[in-house]
Image (cartoon, rainbow, N blue to C red):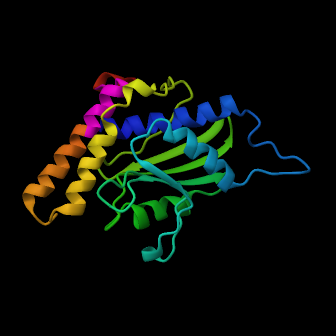
Amino acid sequence: MRMFYLIGSILESSIKKLFREQPDILLHTDDSTMTEWNLGHHLANEISKYIFWLNHDLDLSKRNYENRRPDIIFHKHGIHELNFLVIELKINGDIENDIEKLKNYWMSEPLRYRFGASINIKSAVDFNINLFSNEVNEKYSFSHQNDSISVPSLDLKDGFAEQVNRVTKIINYKNLHNSGNQKEVREYKKRTDQMVFDLYGFTNKKIRMV
């Protein structure tokens, strides 16, 4: 539950931060126009400042899944157990098909991304986030009155890479059909989640405010 609302707050904060730093990013001129790919590139860079402990990719082709290409993903290369967030992005477009793709392609077996987000951006003050989770049966709705989350400083990021590497080593070198190894992976993932909550000070009280 906490991670669900934290991810929603991170996405909202990232969009607001992108427009603060590049207020004319959607400006069309006679020489150039913004594409969804280019907007996705800038947005992914903003989100990665918050979800820094994982790899992120843009428009990555999934060869084993009919070459489908999610717009933005946060994961760990080479393993499914840390598939974290998949995003479909539109500039003033229809998101209904994107929502179905998120649920059917990316959040089901075997990929099972923990979170899926369909984001439709029209302007700095007109954007919509539809966030879904494999863990809670709720949908995140943003509010422009919500406080933005600050990007964590470098000295607060210690230990995150180590936690991710531990999960990766277990998956690469041990039999995941073994219940003991599965439990070990769950414990490391749970510990990483707690480190994230502590980093952002995201408590149940904070959720009620959101």
User: How many numbered tags mark residues here?
Assistant: 0
Please check the rendered image and state whether residue 193 is part of the magenta-colored stretch, yes or no: yes
* 96, above or below 123, in the image: below
| Segment colored magenta | 192-203
> As drawn, is 32 to the left or to the right of 178?
right
Residue 29 x/y as whole percent: 88, 46
Q: Is residue 202 visible?
A: no
As drawn, the residue found furthest toward the right would be 30
Which image quarter holds the C terminus? top left
Q: Is residue 72 above or below residue 5?
A: below
**Percent position (x, y) of residue 185?**
19, 51
Q: Residue drawn at (45%, 47%), measured in percent from left and top?
A: 131
Residue in the foreground of this view, choosing between 203 and 180: 180
Q: Predominant secondary structure in magenta?
A: helix
| Residue 149 belongs to the span the image colors magenta | no
Residue 67 at least partly seen? yes
Residue 95 against residue 136 in the figure, above or below:
below
Q: Give the residue at x 40% y 24%.
A: 155
Q: Give the residue at x 46% y 35%.
A: 50
Give residue 175's position: percent from left, percent from top. 15, 65
Q: Quadrant of the N terminus?
A: top left
Where residue 200 appears, as percent x and y from the top left, is: 38, 26
